[in-house]
Amino acid sequence: MATVYSVNPAWIREMDALVQEFPDVFRIKRWMEISKTYEMPKKYIRIGKPRELSPAQRENLEEMCGIKKQVQNCNI
């Protein structure tokens, strides 16, 4: 089992939703005023690196964004 501690409100909301949906897999181990500690199987823990776009993907995204800029602002 893995233990996950968070003070980030967005992560806490996400984890609370998982606890309610899958109580047999995710559980709250401890909570305080601004933080919570959860317990879950290690296989559900994933930390990823930011994606890197290939030149072709970047060009495609810039083209799509150029079309979208006619309607609204678009940040890449």
Image (spheres, grey):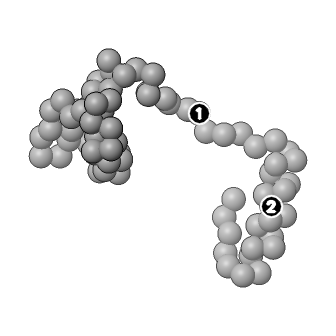
Tell whether 51 sits left or right of 7.
right
Q: CA distance from mark 1 to mark 2?
A: 22 Å
Is tag 1's residue or tag 2's residue first in the polypeptide sequence? 1
Which residue is painted at 28% across and 30% down in the image?
Answer: 24
Which residue is painted at 27% across and 27% down in the image?
Answer: 39
Q: Is residue 8 visible?
A: no
| Residue annotated with mark 1 | 49
Which residue is painted at 33% across and 44% down in the image?
Answer: 21
The spot of residue 1 in percent (x, y) is: 32, 18
The spot of residue 50 in percent (x, y) is: 61, 39
Q: Secondary structure at mark 2?
A: helix
The spot of residue 13 in percent (x, y) is: 31, 50
The spot of residue 5 in percent (x, y) is: 27, 32
Amino acid type at circle 1 is Lys
Q: Quadrant of residue 11?
A: top left
Which residue is painted at 77% across and 81% down in the image?
Answer: 70
In the drawing, what numbered circle is on residue 61?
Answer: none
Q: Quadrant of residue 54?
A: top right
Indicate whether 30 appears above or below 1: below
Q: Nearer the viewer, residue 18 or 65?
A: 18
The number of discs equals 2
Tell whether 21 sits left or right of 43.
left
Which residue occupies the extreme left position in the image? 33
Amino acid type at circle 2 is Glu
| Residue annotated with mark 2 | 62
